[in-house]
Image (tube, rainbow, N blue to C red):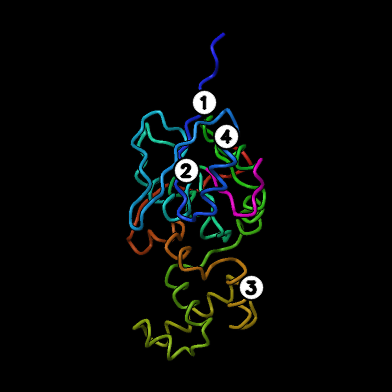
Amino acid sequence: MLMPLAIRVRVAHPEPLVHRGIVATLGADSRFQVDEQRPCAGHQPSSETAALQVLVTDLPLGVTAALHRGGAEPAVLVLSHLDGELSIRGALERGVKGYLTHDCLPEQLVDAVMALARGQRYLQGSVVQRLADTVAQDLPTPREVDVLRLMATGLCNKAIAAELNIGCGTVKTHVKALLDKLGAPTRTAAADIAKRRGLLDPVAAGLAPVRLLRRRGRVAGCHLHAAGHALA
């Protein structure tokens, strides 16, 4: 009887400890053939091998690989410490097929790789919950996030206007919109809510969902579909 072929996985995570943990977990399972690649600064993980099925990496490198992914290239699985909605939604809209956080169980990593190799999506349970909690909430626009980040440092409207080179009235409009979208009674409360939701993370700021970025004419892309633990 023919033995099933092992799933070809490339691990290219820039954090050494996380990289070793992924390699050790997958390497201990005979269903996987693990190919290690240590990504260098400024270089995306290579996926030139046609037989490669899944690439496991971090959020920035994963998004870059997903955006350049062709039909024969591997599905991208992100393992990240970021669990904010901008990070998750932005990654999925840009083609990432699986999303895990650093507190995932080894079994979840294995299940995720298996799901992606079958052509499915896989989201960790806490990631699904984060999306469910925020799916009905309006996200701040990229400009509102700029205002929010400065507001969180304690700057007044006049100082924010000077920093962003916009009018003070425009800042007031953005602040009002932010308080409404975040359901916050005060500027301080808005900053606290934004931190809890991961809206102020600098990496997440570059991953605003495509529908928001399109307003500024920067990118075009696909819409986010509903997600579960493993989705076809």
The Cα atoms of the two marked residues, 4 and 3, are separated by 37 Å
Callout 3: 10 Å neighbours few (<14), some, many (20+)? few
User: Which numbered circle lies on residue 115?
Assistant: 4
Secondary structure of the residue carrying numbered label 2: strand
Q: Which residue is mark 2?
A: 11
Up-down relation of residue 51 to residue 191 (above or below)? above
Q: Is residue 214 magenta?
A: no
- Closer to the camera in the image, 131 or 201: 201
Disc 3: which residue: 183
Q: Is residue 99 in the magenta section?
A: yes
Q: Earlier in the sequence, mark 2 or mark 4?
A: 2
Q: Label 1: few (<14), some or many (≥20) within 10 Å?
A: few
Image depth: mark 1 or mark 3 in front = 1
In the foreground, 154 or 58 = 58
Query: Which mark is drawn over residue 6?
Result: 1
CA–CA distance in space, label 2 to label 4:
16 Å
Disc 1/disc 3 C-alpha distance (Å): 49 Å
Give the residue at x 52% y 71%: 200
Residue 114 horizontal/vertical position (percent): 57, 33
Which amino acid, mark 1?
Ala
**Residue type at mark 3?**
Gly
Q: Is residue 63 left or right of residue 26?
A: left
The residue segment tinted magenta is 98-107
Q: Residues within 10 Å of mark 2 (few under 14, many from 20)?
A: many
Q: Position of residue 59 (x, y in %)?
A: 47, 54
In the image, what residue type sits under mark 2? Val
| Secondary structure type for disc 3 | loop
Q: Nearer the viewer, mark 2 or mark 4?
A: 2
